[in-house]
Amino acid sequence: MLWKRYQCTYGEPPPSARCGHCVVKVKSSVWDGTLVVFHGGTNDRQFLGDLVVLHLENGLWTRPQTTGGPSPRAFHCGAVIGTSVYYFGGRTGARVHNEVWKLDTNLWEWTCLNLIGAKPDAREKADCIGLDESRVLVFGGYDGIRWLNDVFVINVVTLESTQVRVGGTLPSPRAGHKLAMLHQGILMFGGETTNTQYLGDLWALKGLFRDSSAGGTPESQQDNSPRWVKMQLSGPSPAGRSGHGFVNAGAKMIVYGGRGDEGWLSRKAIYHKDVAVIDRESVRWVKVPSMGEEPSERAHHSLTLVDKNKLLLFGGYNGKSTYGDMWFLEGSDDELLPSATGADEMTTAASSVQNLTSAITSKIFARQTPKADREDANPGWMQMNSSAEQTSILGCLRQRMGLPRNPAAGTPHRQEEESRLKEAQLQILKIAMKVDPSLPRELGKEAALARARSFFTTVEPENLTPEDVQALLYDYKCILPKLLARARQQGKDISSITKWNHVEYGDIKISEIPDLCEVYKELVVAL
């Protein structure tokens, strides 16, 4: 994996040096791109409350004008739902907070949510994560006296807050841990607990989502209740730490940095700068060498997935200095994956995507002991083609056939984009031939498009293959610019038709395909 220092001062000044801040990514049709939102933190002399935004596509820094909002704070946590960011907790000096603040990134308006029900106590160094379109989960933290391991779910639509009763063996109370979503479950790594002990354990929190395949029997309801499962993976696992980064990057889960110690004898604080990866194909920890210049060791930085195979590192603290540098960590899916399989296995994978996904399902995070834990962690919810997964079945199939997961992996961005477009154009021609097998192979582009569009606007979404969806999304992005100018002149709201413009094929969830089809039909009719 390759580190690249990022230096861009276009527009407003970028965020100053800090640690304990929050950074999130928001895909915005209103602002026509990907927003990276920085908030709060501390520079060891004062607590900060500023809001700084990077428009990722054009490199523009802005400082939106807002009114009200939370007081300056650090060591809070943030989660994104739609185009809103929800912040919880944190510390200002010796005071810890328990408010939940909503930041609307369309209007840049702050709202303090007035929750009802069982609310989480004030705390710092907790972590939170968005579960779906309406719920945020909060786990753990430090309230100034105790380390915590409670779980709360906050419904940001109804404003109900609920403490969740979780079964299984509970993780140790902790703070400075990190959560990451993996399908319909949550992974947690590390943290700091009582007596300044740094943890290196990995846990899965399951049963937060209703599994429609489980039926309505009492047994299935019990199986789907929230529960913790401790994961035991082979390979060189990272040392215990807190204040690290932990990110789901598709085919890999990435850990970077954090504060730890040299062991229970010396307890001397150390700061890490290693990159450790859970390779989800081999289901093991992997140490990854870094190339080029690399950032210094640090903790309480931010590590954010801003694009496929690209993470943004900012800030942090090394025990003496607070950082304000910014780095991209770039890699490709196939860097960490096993070598290509034999000819017989490739033939089997090519003939049946279902067989492929079943094989993947049987491996992912299934090496558990004892038997009860092994059965509990054997994961329909963790399979690579889950409806909540962000890695495409097609990418897995290519890998098993001895090809890179991404057809243009390792090439510059422009060549990679051109390769994806060529694949989509080829798929449109294949769809035209599928609709009418009697068509000549030298069919012109416009005629092929007409037949493919006829197919896309009449087929049921559940009957689309992954390749069909890739081609449909490509054609949607070709049509959209032709209609935007007309829509703006007519004063129409364009947010509904531009919502898929900055979405990559690999980021589309199965549950979102019907909506994509409806928007696509609207554009085709308007042509």
Image (cartoon, rainbow, N blue to C red):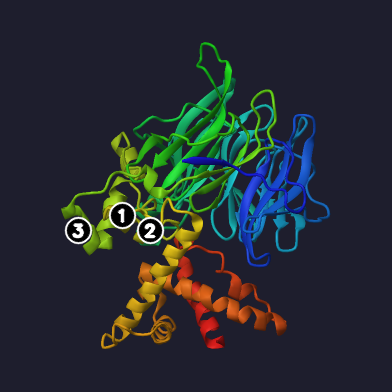
Looking at the picture, tell me which residue is in the foreground, 439 or 395.
439
Direction from residue 16 to residue 154 in the image, left or right: left
SS of the residue at dot 2?
Answer: loop
Q: Residue at x 77, y 30 (%)?
A: 94
Residue 450 screen position, x and y as percent: 42, 86
Residue 415 screen position, x and y as percent: 46, 59
Dividing the picture into quadrants, the one containing residue 484 is: bottom right
What amino acid does circle 1 point to?
Answer: Leu
State which tag comes first along the sequence, 3 or 2: 3
Q: Which residue is mark 1?
A: 403
What amino acid does circle 2 point to?
Answer: Pro
Residue 170 screen position, x and y as percent: 48, 35
Q: Residue at x 28, y 62 (%)?
A: 353
The numbered mark at residue 222 is none
- Bin the neighbour count of mark 2 within 10 Å (Cα to Cα): few under 14, some 14-19, many 20 and up: some
Marks 3 and 1 in Cβ contact (< 8 Å): no
The number of numbered discs placed on residues in the rendered structure image is 3
Q: Using the image, determine if residue 453 lies above or below residue 12.
A: below
Marks 3 and 2 in Cβ contact (< 8 Å): no
Marks 2 and 1 in Cβ contact (< 8 Å): yes
Q: Residue at x 45, y 30 (%)?
A: 238
Dividing the picture into quadrants, the one containing residue 245 is: top right
Q: Residue at x 51, y 30 (%)?
A: 172
What amino acid does circle 3 point to?
Answer: Thr
Disc 3 versus disc 2: distance between alpha carbons?
20 Å
Q: Of circles 3 and 2, which is in front?
A: 2
Looking at the rendered image, the quarter that the C terminus falls into is bottom right
Q: Which residue is mark 2?
A: 407
The answer to whether residue 207 is seen in the rendering is yes
State which tag comes first along the sequence, 3 or 1: 3
- Bin the neighbour count of mark 3 within 10 Å (Cα to Cα): few under 14, some 14-19, many 20 and up: some
Q: Residue furthest left?
A: 344
